[in-house]
Image (tube, helix red, strand yellow):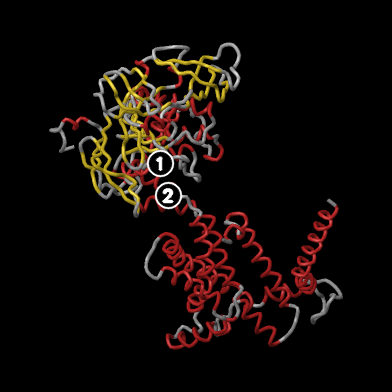
C-alpha cells in the first residue's frame, strides 16, 4: 500500500513484474509481466504446459518465483504466505472439503478470520443465495452435482471479499450446456461484485465469451495481451492466430505497397502499410470468405462438413495452399471434388 | 460359458474350504466353553455356564483382562503419537536417510519376536522396567508401530493436497489446516491404525512372557493356565477374547479405513 503510486501502473490492482520460474531445465515462466485493472477479468489462455497454471500458483502463493515480483494494490506480496494474501481461488476440481457441509465449507474462510458467528451466518447465507444454493447448507459436497459443487467453490472463494479472484479451469469438468450457463453466471457475478479476476483456461471459445482481455501464453511467455476482438481479429503472431479460432495462415513477402507475394507466385491485395521486402504473415478467418472478392481462390473441395449453421469446406487451391472456408448453410452440402471459387477482400486479411 | 460356470463353482468350493479351515478352531472352542464336563472333552456331554462363571469369579483372570485392556489402550495411544508424525515425515518430506527410515519403521515385523523379546528383556532389566505395565506398553508400541505407519502412510498417499492448498489460500495457518482439514479427513486411517495397534498388543504373548512378570496380561495368563492345569476355563476365556477382538474389527470396518484399501 505504500509503494507504487508514482508509476503509471500503480493504478493496476494486480501487477506481475518479470516473474520467472524454472523446474529443472524447463522455464515454466520466462520473465512474465502483466497488469490487471481493478474490476477487470483477464483470461490467461494457453495450451497445457504453457505456464499458465504456474503463473496462477505464483499469484496465489503456492509457488515461489525465482525472480520478479507480484503486487496487489501496490503492495509487494511475493514473499507472503498464501493465507495472508486475501485471494479467493476456485480450483480445477473445486477442492471442496469433503468432510464438511456446504455451509461449513463456505464459512471456513470467515472462521479463519475470527469473524463473529452471527456475522458468519449472515455472510454465508448471502453468498449461497448469490450462487442460488440457499437451502443446501446441510449437504455434503458428494451429495451435490458437479455444477452445484462448482457454485459452492465459487461462494467459498468470494464470501470473504477477497482482493482478487482466481479461477483455475473451473468449467473443465462440466458438460457443455452447464458450462455455458456457469460461464455467464460467473461473469455476471464478477461484474456485480467488481472483482478483479484472473481466469485460466485452454479453451479459446470460453476465453472469448468471458474476458475483458486475454493474455495468450505459450512456452512460459506471454504471446499477446489484448481485448478479445483484438486477439481474434489482429493476432500478434502465428501462435495466437492458430490457437484462437479457426484460421488460414499464409506467409509471404511484401512486393509493393498493399501487395503480398506468396511462395507459389500468387499475389494478394492486402490492407497494410508494411514496407516492400518485409516478410509478413497473413491471417484469413474461414468465415470471412465469400463467393467472390478482390482476391480469388479457385480449387477443388477436399472435404465438406455440415455444422448446422454453416458448411465447413476444405479447399485445395490450384497450385497453392489449402484453405478452410465456412459458408452459411444454404441449399445442399457441396460434394467433395466439386470445383469452387471463393474470394476475400483486402480488409478481411490481417497482416502481421 | 460352461467352463466359466465350472471355474466359478471351483472358486466357491475353494473359498468355502478355506473358510471352514479357519473357522474350525472356533467350532471346537465354542462348544467346549459351554461344556458341563470337568475336563476337556469334545463333543461336550452337556451344557453349562460354569467355565464362564469361574472366569468371572477369579480375580486373577479379571485382573489380567483389565491389564490387557489398558496396556492395549496405552499402546495404541503411544503408537499413534509416534506413528502419525513418522508417517507424515516418510510420505511428505524428502531428507537424507528417508528410505532407510522407511525400511526401519517396518523392521519390527521382520525381526523374530523372540529375538526382540530377549533383547528388550536385557535392556529393560538394566532400566528396571521388567514387570512394569508401562515397560510392556513401550515394548508393545515397538511391535505396533509398523501397522500404524503402514495404514497411515497409505491414507496420506491418497490424500489430495489441493485441499490443503485450498485451506491455506482461504486463510488457514498450517496448524489450522492440520487440525481442521488433514486430520479429520484421515480419521478413518487413524481409527484403523489405533485399533490395529490395540489388537496387536491385546493378543501378544511372547513379549509379555518375558516382560510382564507378576503383572500378567490375558494372553500370558492363558499360557500359564495351559501349562498348569487344563480345564475348559481357557475355552471360555478364548471365546471372550475372540468376541472382544471381533468387536474391534467390526469397529474398524464401520469407522476405519478398510485393510483392503491400505494394501498398496
The residue lying at 34 percent from left, 28 percent from top is: A252
Position in image of residue B8 (x %, y %): 80, 56
Instruction: Judge whether residue B238 can be spotted in this image.
Output: yes
Number of residue marks: 2
The one of A344 and A319 positioned closer to us in this rendering: A319
Q: Is residue A5 left or right of residue A326?
A: left
Q: Is residue B115 left or right of residue B2?
A: left
Residue B244 vs A348, above or below: the answer is below
User: Mark number for residue B180?
Assistant: 2
Place of residue B35 in the rendered image (x, y in percent of width and height, measured from the top left): 81, 74
In the image, residue A107 above or below residue B254: above
The quarter of the picture where residue B193 lies is bottom right
How packed mark 1 is, by other alpha carbons closer than 10 Å (few <14, some 14-19, many 20 or more), is many
Label 1 element class: helix
> Could you tell me which residue is drawn at 54 percent across and 55 percent down?
B188
Asked if labels 1 and 2 touch by Cβ distance under 8 angstroms, the answer is: yes
Q: Looking at the rendering, in which quadrant would you find the C terminus of chain A? A: top left
Residue in front for this viewpoint, B9 or B40? B9
Question: SS for tag 2?
Answer: helix
Image mark 2: chain: B
Check the image and name the residue furthest to the left. Answer: A6
Amino acid at each position: 500500500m505504500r509503494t507504487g503510486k508514482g508509476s503509471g501502473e500503480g493504478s493496476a490492482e494486480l501487477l506481475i513484474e518479470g516473474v520467472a520460474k524454472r523446474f529443472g531445465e524447463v522455464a515454466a515462466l520466462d520473465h512474465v509481466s502483466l497488469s490487471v485493472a481493478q474490476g477487470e477479468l483477464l483470461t490467461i489462455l494457453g495450451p497445457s504446459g504453457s505456464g499458465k497454471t504456474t503463473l496462477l500458483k505464483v499469484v496465489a502463493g503456492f509457488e515461489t518465483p525465482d525472480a520478479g515480483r507480484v503486487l496487489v494494490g501496490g503492495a509487494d506480496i511475493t514473499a507472503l504466505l498464501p493465507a495472508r494474501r486475501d485471494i479467493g481461488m476456485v480450483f480445477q476440481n473445486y477442492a471442496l472439503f469433503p468432510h464438511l457441509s456446504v455451509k461449513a465449507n463456505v464459512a471456513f474462510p470467515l472462521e479463519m478470520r475470527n469473524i463473529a458467528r452471527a456475522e458468519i451466518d449472515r455472510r454465508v447465507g448471502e453468498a449461497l443465495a448469490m450462487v442460488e444454493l440457499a437451502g443446501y447448507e446441510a449437504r455434503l459436497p458428494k451429495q451435490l452435482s458437479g455444477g452445484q459443487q462448482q457454485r459452492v467453490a465459487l461462494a467459498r472463494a468470494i464470501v470473504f471479499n477477497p482482493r482478487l479472484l482466481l479461477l483455475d479451469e473451473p468449467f473443465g469438468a462440466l458438460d457443455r450446456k452447464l458450462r455455458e450457463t456457469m460461464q455467464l453466471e460467473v461473469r455476471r457475478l464478477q461484474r456485480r461484485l467488481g472483482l478483479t479476476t484472473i481466469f485460466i483456461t485452454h479453451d479459446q471459445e470460453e476465453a472469448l465469451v468471458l474476458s475483458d482481455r486475454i493474455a495468450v501464453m505459450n512456452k512460459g511467455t506471454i504471446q499477446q495481451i489484448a481485448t478479445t476482438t483484438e486477439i481474434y481479429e489482429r493476432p500478434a503472431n502465428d501462435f495466437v492466430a492458430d490457437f484462437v479460432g479457426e484460421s488460414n495462415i499464409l506467409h509471404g513477402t511484401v512486393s509493393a505497397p498493399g501487395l503480398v507475394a506468396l511462395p507459389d507466385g500468387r499475389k494478394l491485395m492486402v490492407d497494410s502499410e508494411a514496407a516492400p521486402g518485409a516478410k509478413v504473415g497473413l491471417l484469413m478467418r474461414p468465415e470471412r470468405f465469400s463467393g467472390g472478392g478482390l482476391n480469388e481462390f479457385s480449387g477443388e473441395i477436399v472435404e465438406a462438413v455440415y455444422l448446422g449453421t454453416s458448411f465447413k469446406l476444405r479447399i485445395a487451391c490450384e497450385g497453392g495452399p489449402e484453405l478452410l472456408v465456412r459458408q452459411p448453410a444454404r441449399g445442399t452440402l457441396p460434394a467433395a471434388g466439386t470445383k469452387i471459387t471463393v474470394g476475400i477482400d483486402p480488409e478481411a486479411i490481417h497482416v502481421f | 460359458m460352461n467352463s466359466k460356470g465350472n471355474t466359478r463353482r471351483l472358486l466357491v468350493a475353494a473359498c468355502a474350504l478355506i473358510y471352514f479351515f479357519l473357522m474350525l478352531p472356533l467350532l471346537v472352542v465354542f462348544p467346549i466353553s459351554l461344556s458341563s464336563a470337568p475336563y476337556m472333552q469334545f463333543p461336550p456331554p452337556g451344557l453349562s455356564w460354569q467355565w464362564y462363571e469361574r472366569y468371572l469369579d477369579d480375580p486373577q483372570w479379571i485382573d489380567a483382562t483389565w491389564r490387557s485392556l489398558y496396556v492395549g489402550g496405552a499402546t495404541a495411544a503411544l503408537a499413534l503419537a509416534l506413528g502419525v508424525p513418522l508417517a507424515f515425515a516418510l510420505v511428505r518430506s524428502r531428507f537424507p536417510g528417508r528410505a532407510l527410515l522407511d525400511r526401519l519403521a517396518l523392521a519390527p515385523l521382520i525381526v523374530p519376536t523372540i529375538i526382540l523379546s530377549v533383547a528388550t528383556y536385557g535392556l529393560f532389566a538394566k532400566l528396571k522396567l521388567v514387570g512394569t505395565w508401562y515397560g510392556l506398553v513401550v515394548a508393545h508400541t515397538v511391535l505396533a508401530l509398523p501397522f500404524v505407519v503402514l495404514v497411515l502412510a497409505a491414507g496420506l498417499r491418497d490424500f489430495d493436497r489441493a485441499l490443503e492448498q485450498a485451506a491455506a489460500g482461504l486463510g488457514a495457518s498450517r496448524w489450522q489446516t492440520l487440525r481442521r482439514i488433514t486430520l479429520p479427513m484421515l480419521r478413518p486411517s487413524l481409527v484403523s491404525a489405533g485399533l490395529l495397534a490395540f489388537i496387536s498388543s491385546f493378543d501378544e504373548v511372547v513379549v509379555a512372557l518375558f516382560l510382564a512378570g507378576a503383572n500378567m496380561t490375558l494372553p500370558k495368563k492363558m499360557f500359564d493356565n495351559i501349562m498348569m492345569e487344563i480345564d475348559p476355563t481357557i475355552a471360555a476365556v478364548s471365546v471372550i477374547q475372540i468376541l472382544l477382538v471381533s468387536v474391534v474389527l467390526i469397529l474398524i470396518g464401520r469407522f476405519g479405513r478398510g485393510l483392503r484399501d491400505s494394501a498398496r
